[in-house]
Amino acid sequence: MAFRSELRPLNPGVVFRDDAGLGCAPIGNLFSRVPDADAVATVEAALARDVRFFDTAPLYGSGESERKLGLALRGVPRDDYLIATKVGRILIDDSGAPVRGAASGHDSVVDLSRDGVLRSLEGSLARLGVDRVDVLHLHDPLDVETALSASFPALAELREQGVVRAISVGLGKLDPLERIAAEAPLDVLMEAGRLTLLDRTALDRLLPVAARRGIGVIAAGVFNSGILVDPVASPFYEYKPAPADVVEAALRLRDICASFGVRLADAAVQFPLRAGADAVVVGARTPAELDAFVDGLDSEMPPELWARL
């Protein structure tokens, strides 16, 4: 099994895909607004496909992703699914004041302090409508010293109290992620975009550290912002228009996949698992996108394809 015990539903009888998670940034209005009904339908589609790991954050829609996820999971037994959310930013209203309770915000500011961690999680629990989360990531902590001295002791305290089952870090920059993996008391980590068909830097630098310390690895950003879905229709890399050489590389990968009758996106979601990740998290805003993700994970890949890629 991919997920260790602390990353599995507490109900042992529930059917659960432990190689896949739904990223909930899109339902938090990433790039375009997603009505509540569409967000609920997407989460319900995930449950129908046995995807029961949901990754959200206050940053996604300034709380809207968490609110919509909580709405969608209302009535689902709490022990039947896993929620990961994040701390490290505080939501603020349009006057710049911190929001209170279950309110969504207008924006967010970085706060890696112990108090910031506790206040952030308090708001997340209220928006999600739950009394605990299964995984708590520290979100993009570029100030590694403060993260190690203030944030992670607070996360470890929450783990000891049972409010959090596992603690983690979520980052797309390899240098701070590598150091945190080596020094912080992590159960799991989530890398974003560094274990993909286009960027394999985590293979030699991060995965050995995680293996040595017994840290689970969740891969996110597997499409590198869209270019590994379709290099022509979505030529974006790291949330910006992709440089010409990156587009050229993605087109070569697409053509190799096509020569084997395989979609580039399907190879992209399977690659991190083949490389050593425990699970892959992919965002979706519609049931169709969720189905495409799961179908891609299950599609047959000729062994020769991986050698070519």
Image (cartoon, helix red, strand yellow):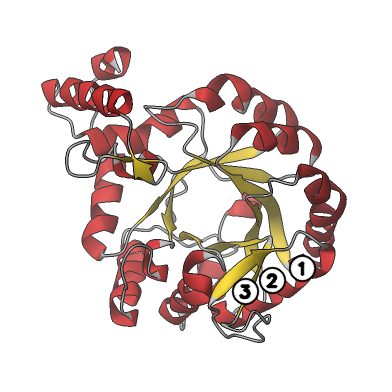
Check the image and report above or below for 60 versus 18: below
Give the structural element (helix, strand or loop) at label 1.
helix
Contact flag, marks 2 and 1 (Cβ < 8 Å): yes
Q: Residues within 10 Å of mark 1 (few under 14, many from 20)?
A: some
Residue 12 falls in image quadrant: bottom right
Going by the image, does 211 lie left or right of 270? right
Residue 72 placement (x, y as % from top left): 41, 77
Looking at the rendered structure, which numbered label has been put on residue 91?
Answer: 3
**What residue type is disc 2 on?**
Ser
Q: Is residue 129 visible?
A: no
Q: Mark 1 points at which residue?
A: 116
Q: In this orientation, which residue lies closer to the viewer: 298 or 251?
A: 251
Image side of residue 189 versus residue 80, left or right: right
Identify the element where label 2 is drawn: helix
Identity of the residue drawn at 55% across and 41% down: 172
Residue at screen point 72% across, 26% down = 212
Q: Which residue is drawn at 19% across and 25% down?
A: 257
Residue 120's tag is 2
Report helix, strand or loop for mark 3.
strand
Circles 3 and 2: CB atoms closer than 8 Å: yes
